[in-house]
Image: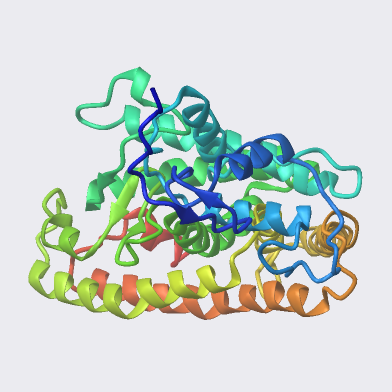
Amino acid sequence: MPRPKSKRKERKCLVCGGVTRVAHMGMDVCRACTVFYRRSKGKMYICRSNTRNCKIGEECRQCRLDRLSRIALNGSKAEESDGSQEDRQCNAIFQTLHSPGSQIQPYEGTPMIAKMSERYRVMCETRLTSELSCRFEPPHPLRININDYPIFPASYDTVNRANRIFLTTLLQFGAAIFPEFATFNERDQWTTVTNFFCRFRTFEAAYRANKMFPTEMEKGFQGYTLYFSEDVVDHFYDDCPNSGDMNEAKRVMRGRFKSNLGPHRESIRKINHRHEEFLASLALMFWMTDGLDVSSAVSAVSERYKETILRELHNYYRDQLHLHDYASRLGEVLMFLQTYEQRAGDMDKHLELLRLLNVYSDDTIAYRLTNI
């Protein structure tokens, strides 16, 4: 007896152009491409046209891998329609590979970036467990997993706690990656880290939001496990111990949210940092000490590490991505970092306004960081 024909509609694979009746990775991707991605993770091929932009169907393995990486990076979490165990395992690999704490495969040309990857993951895990464990009703320990964890609406008190945790982990992060940092006096350590905090917090929040909320551009992060959106504003100050002008504070916060969050997330999405570029950007941000009141020893170490990271970025583009003309891409990544000088200044003004409204007090950690 002949088997009845499947009623599933045939679709074209977004990666290879072949026909597929089953959506993988939450999108129209065929099984062959899904398996290819799983087997090729961590590998590097040679682009047939040397452009990294071959057309779909031209059988270029590198461009096929690039397209799959972009699909996985966009964070689609839809379940596969056939529900097979193999596909569920494959999808779990995608989510782990591209989570904010992803590990970078060791490569002799980028040892600092690889070290950044390892320590960044440790920092993510520490922030995750600390933020969730100090909640009034913490989730079950089985729910505290780096690849699957609850995210709560932000509030005044929870953000203040998250910032304290973040600062502690940043001090540990700096000492673990840069041995010289641990030898600085406390004043130089604090000045370097607090300067880094203001830039890193904004950059990482948008970077992670683009992965966790790829289709919700109105959402952002205020902590590792705290999200922020316009509907959060009305109850943000419910746990604030101060008795300031909360209505005006909410109006200011809502206006800043509308004018800043969407454009900032869109600018990061447009650049679409690879994880290696994200990590290199963190290292360069850490050592943005120009104009700071620090010792000459800090300035000297800063210049040395910036040179090291720039050299590793050159190695990454040339030897790992096999790009011969990467000057424009490198310039784009470096120029983007300059925008955080202005963003840090804008944040100072915003926090000062909230303090004048008696919403933020002198002991609010975010305000103290901008007024050292």
Give the farthest residue toward the front.
Answer: 1
Q: Quadrant of residue 364?
A: bottom left
101 or 238: nearer the eye? 101
Tell whether 199 sits left or right of 225.
right
Residue 27 at what x, y percent from top left?
A: 45, 51
Q: Judge whether residue 361 can be spotted in this image.
A: yes
Q: Is residue 283 visible?
A: no
| 45 is higher (above) or lower (below) than 115 | below
In the displayed structure, 236 sits above or below 41; it is: below
Indicate the colouring scheme.
rainbow
Q: In the depicted view, which residue is nearer to us: 148 or 221?
A: 148
- Total marks placed: 0
Identify which residue is drawn at 90% across, 49% down: 109
- Which residue sits at x=56%, y=33%? 93
Seen at 45% across and 59% down, the residue is 210
| Horizontal and vertical percent position of residue 158 | 27, 45
Quarter residue 334 falls in: bottom right
x and y percentages locating residue 297 in the rendered image = 82, 58
Residue in the foreground of this view, choosing between 357 and 205: 205
Quarter of the N terminus within the rendering: top left
Identify the residue at horizontal 71%, vertical 37% (top origin): 176
- Residue 96 in picture, x, y percent from top left: 55, 36
Q: Is residue 193 left or right of residue 214?
A: right
Relative to 29, does residue 300 appear above or below in the rendering?
below
